[in-house]
Amino acid sequence: MYWHIGKIILENAKWGNKFIDNLSIDLKLEFPTIKGFSIRNLKNMKKFAKEYPDFKFVQNVSAQITWSDNLLILDKVKGIEKRKWYIKETSKNGWGYNVLDWQIKSNLYERQVITDKTTNFQNTLPDIQSDLALQTIKDPYIFDFISLKGKVKELEIEKAMINKIKDVLIELGNGFAFVGSQYKLTVSEKDYFIDLLFYHLKLKCYIVVELKAREFEPTDAGQLNFYLSAIDDLVKDENDNPSIGLLLCKSKDKFTAEYALKDINKPIGVSEYRILQDIPEYLQAQLPKIEDIELHIQEIE
């Protein structure tokens, strides 16, 4: 309906003829119980019809989300393919307005779709599994809800992530289920502890996450490869797919990481992460408060 009204406005509104003003009055008189016919919203309808001239796109894609979400994407996202991606992800993940706003401001599309990711998935996973795993990985991950000052240790980041596990799951993405932290594995009567263990419902596999409060080092890949072998042997069910490793580092040299993963036989991805102190102050002011996002999620639930 909004698209059709917008198209009528495009065809009839001329500079100075007050078509939109008069249409707003007429619609409010004709349909007094229906809201949404303000002058401002009619202008939004005009923009909507102008930006999306293909009605099939409106029917099949943009109609999957709310009008307010459509306007947010229309105002803050440029390019039809990028807009289409945010629309589909909003529909698929059930994002509310505040969560969608945060995803756009944090450049999720660039971090998840067009980023040059460092993984060995293509060499260690079947094609379908590899493609889905690549779509799951982001670089960098934004943990802006973690505020730690000074020289930060891995355990401090891990504890902060556990305290904000709902926010961690939002950033990791749809499909992640939290299994445990400092997950104990016993190999040859010696105990080893995985930083964070998740299960991915779509990939149908365990995901081992190791945190490093420093730059990536080649030995990190060997350690994670060992953990994945242990998980696959001691924890994984016969119906589960091969476990995947994710190294989250303060920084990484791409070529060093690629060489380190080259001959590793387990699927591993290496990504950087950012906590609040790593985000420039001018960007911090633009990000929604995590409390607002949590409140919106509670309203949805």
Image (cartoon, rainbow, N blue to C red):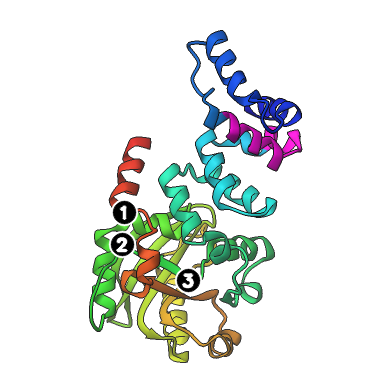
Residues at marks 3 and 2 touching, judged by CB atoms closer than 8 Å: no
In three-dimensional space, the C-alpha distance between marks 3 and 1, rounded to whole angstroms, equals: 19 Å
Front residue (pair 34, 219): 34
Residue at (62, 67) in percent of width and height: 114
Left or right: 130 in relation to 229: right
The residue type indicated by label 2 comes to Phe
**Dot 3 or dot 1, earlier in sequence:** 3
Residue underneath mark 1: 290
From this view, report whether residue 24 is shown above or below residue 166.
above
Describe the element under mark 1 as helix, strand or loop.
helix
Dot label at residue 140: 3
Q: Nearer the viewer, mark 3 or mark 1?
A: 1
Q: Quadrant of residue 251?
A: bottom left
The CA span between labels 3 and 2 is 15 Å
Which badge, 3 or 2, comes first in the chain's sequence? Answer: 3
Task: Give residue 239's mark.
Answer: none
User: Can you identify the residue that label 2 sits on?
Assistant: 145
Q: Are marks 2 and 1 in contact (CB under 8 Å)?
A: yes
Residue 170 pos. (x, y %): 41, 54
Helix, strand or loop at label 2? It is: loop
